[in-house]
Amino acid sequence: MVKSRFITARAAARQMVKQRSGVIVLVTGSPARAHSPGVTGIGAAFGAMETLTENLAFEVSPFRVRVACLRTLANCRNVRTCETSFLLSLKGRKDDPDAQIQAGCGPQAAGASTC
């Protein structure tokens, strides 16, 4: 995932530097900075893409080329509940009350809303 973004951004940057303008946008997700169990691989990849954004922006900004990164986050009132719901759905355990309690959500968890 990171390698393809790197190759594509580098090729685009070369063309944009020649024309002395342009914008490169990379998209990542909340696991880039949220430390949650079960998302280590994608979190590391998103983190690498954000670092790529910073370094590429430093290199091409003198040529009036901008580089931006958009980190998406699920539209949710409670981020903790949203991330937990995502993790449970990945594990196929969203309807398991014991898994919900372990994750800190569900009707049985103190003060938590249902995932």
Image: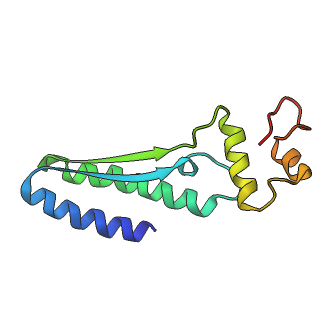
Which quadrant would residue 73 be assigned to in this image? Answer: top right
Q: Residue at x 67, y 46 (%)?
A: 83
Q: Residue at x 64, y 58 (%)?
A: 39
Q: Residue at x 90, y 49 (%)?
A: 97
In the foreground, 58 or 75 = 75
Which quadrant would residue 48 be assigned to in this image? Answer: bottom left
The x, y position of residue 65, in whole percent, is: 18, 49
| Vertical comparison of 65 with 10: above or below | above
Q: Is residue 73 left or right of residue 26?
A: right
| Vertical comparison of 110 with 7: above or below | above
The x, y position of residue 45, in whole percent, is: 50, 61
In the foreground, 42 or 90 = 90
The x, y position of residue 1, in whole percent, is: 46, 68
Q: Is residue 65 left or right of residue 108?
A: left
Q: Is residue 114 left or right of residue 12?
A: right
Q: Is residue 98 left or right of residue 26?
A: right
Which quadrant would residue 19 be assigned to in this image? Answer: bottom left
Q: How is the image coloured?
A: rainbow
Rendered-image quadrant of the C terminus: top right
Residue at the farthest top position? 111
Residue at the farthest front position? 95
In the foreground, 85 or 17 = 85
The x, y position of residue 36, in whole percent, is: 68, 50
Q: Residue at x 34, y 66 (%)?
A: 6
Count of numbered circles on the image: 0
